[in-house]
Image (spheres, rainbow, N blue to C red):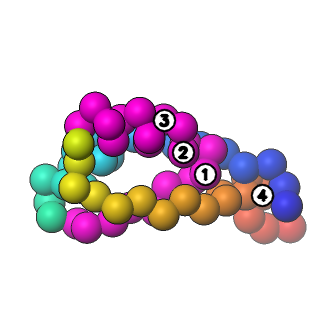
Amino acid sequence: MGKGFGVVNIKEKIQITEKTGIPFMIIPSENAEEVTEIQKELKANVEFSMCHMPMKLFN
């Protein structure tokens, strides 16, 4: 697998997801630690699935 990348503004994305009633989010595994901390802080009722997001999608 190649190098992965994370995304920014995770906290805001979690808040919007919960507010709109979406029950889950797919998050880059590179953001897993950040999501854990934010989830503790917000106590959001959202499930998370972590996945590897490769930087290079096409040859």
Relative to 27, is 43 on the left or the right? left
Q: CA distance from mark 3 to mark 1?
A: 10 Å
- Residue at screen point 35% across, 62% down: 47
Q: CA distance from mark 4 to mark 1?
A: 16 Å
Secondary element type, mark 3:
helix
Query: Do the CB atoms of the residues marked 3 and 1 lie less than 8 Å apart?
Result: no
Which of 28/54 is in front?
28
- Residue at screen point 80% across, 49% down: 3
The first of marks 3 and 4 along the sequence is 3
Q: The magenta stretch spans which residues?
A: 22-42
Residue type at mark 4 is: Lys
Give the crowd class for mark 2: few <14, some 14-19, many >=20 residues within 10 Å: some
Q: Position of residue 12 (x, y in %)?
A: 29, 39
The first of marks 4 and 1 along the sequence is 1
Residue type at mark 2 is: Ala
The residue carrying mark 1 is 29
The residue carrying mark 3 is 34
Circle nearer the viewer, 3 or 4: 3
The first of marks 3 and 1 along the sequence is 1
Which of 47/17 is in front?
47
Q: Is-magenta flag for residue 44?
A: no
Q: Position of residue 48 (x, y in %)?
A: 42, 59
The residue carrying mark 4 is 56
Observer able to see residue 9: no
Circle nearer the viewer, 2 or 4: 2
Q: Quadrant of the N terminus?
A: bottom right
